[in-house]
């Protein structure tokens, strides 16, 4: 399997966290990809032009991160990260949706900040900031229920919080959210978290 990969993407990080938790990291060839490069061939496999994209042995290309994560989860031998049925499944998928939404909003806000001065929208940026803040407040309120179990939901949350640390360290998300901060600290020493950390600097 070949993964179109970027060290700074929280969605790529989530996929690699799943691969590590399921013992599949060595089965994946990582192909560094800049989806913003004018010369990239990424859209030939993923017409959305986004990473991650996973090419299987038969040439099939899977995208986006929830699909790739669930595919990898189906291959491993350990306990599944995607609960099969019932309330546990919906709880995990709901957490993944919250976390992915945080990443989407944070990325949109970062892209907006990089637009030329005459094209920036303060209102649009504020909308994304508030979406992240509300989502973090929800996670703080529910932090006691996150526990130590690893699911696609908790991995997605860890990836999202890591992205905020990486791109928005000047807006510390831990302030006013002690329960979420404590949970993150307890989970941060897992191999899947340590080995997928974004670059420093």
Image (cartoon, helix red, strand yellow):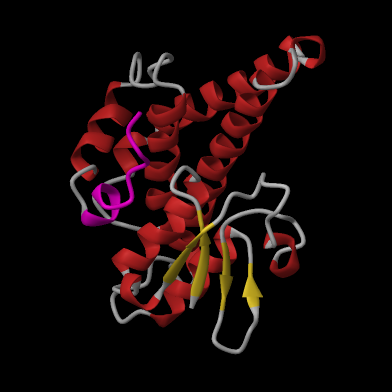
Say which quarter of the image contains residue 143: top left
State left or right for residue 168 relative to residue 130: left
State left or right for residue 152 relative to residue 56: left
Give the residue displayed 52% in from the left and 55% down from the top.
Answer: 93
Give the residue displayed 56% in from the left and 58% down from the top.
Answer: 52
Q: Quadrant of the C terminus?
A: top left
Q: Nearer the viewer, residue 3 or 169?
A: 3
Residue 13: x %, y % from top left: 43, 51
Give the residue displayed 50% in from the left and 45% down from the top.
Answer: 9
Residue occupying the far right of the picture? 118
State left or right for residue 166 relative to residue 144: right
* Residue extent of the magenta highlight: 191-201
Give the residue displayed 24% in from the left and 48% down from the top.
Answer: 194
Residue occupying the far bottom of the picture? 58
145 shown above or below 151? above
69 shown above or below 107? below
Labels in figure, total: 0
Q: Nearer the viewer, residue 200 or 77?
A: 200
Say which quarter of the image contains residue 30: bottom left
Main secondary structure found in the magenta portion: loop
Reply yes or no: does residue 197 show up in magenta.
yes
Reply yes or no: does residue 144 show up in magenta.
no
Residue 127: x %, y % from top left: 69, 19
Q: Nearer the viewer, residue 50 or 124?
A: 50
184 shown above or below 5? above
Residue 98: x %, y % from top left: 54, 41
Residue occupying the far front of the picture? 39
């Amino acid at each position: 399997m070949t993964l179109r990969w970027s060290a700074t993407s929280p969605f790529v990080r989530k996929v690699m966290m799943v691969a590590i938790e399921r013992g599949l990291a060595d089965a994946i060839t990582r192909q560094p990809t800049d989806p913003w490069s004018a010369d990239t061939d990424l859209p030939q496999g993923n017409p959305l032009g986004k990473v991650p994209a996973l090419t299987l042995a038969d040439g099939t290309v899977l995208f986006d991160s929830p699909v790739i994560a669930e595919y990898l989860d189906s291959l491993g031998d350990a306990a599944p990260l995607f609960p099969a049925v019932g309330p546990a499944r919906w709880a995990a998928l709901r957490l993944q949706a919250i976390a992915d939404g945080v990443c989407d909003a944070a990325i949109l806000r970062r892209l907006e900040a990089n637009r030329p001065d005459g094209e920036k929208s303060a209102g649009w940026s504020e909308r994304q900031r508030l979406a992240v803040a509300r989502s973090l407040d929800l996670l703080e309120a529910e932090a006691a229920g996150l526990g130590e179990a690893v699911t696609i939901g908790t991995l997605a949350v860890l990836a999202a919080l890591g992205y905020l640390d990486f791109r928005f360290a000047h807006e510390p998300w831990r302030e006013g959210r002690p329960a979420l901060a404590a949970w993150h600290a307890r989970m941060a020493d897992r191999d899947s978290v340590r080995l997928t950390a974004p670059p420093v600097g």
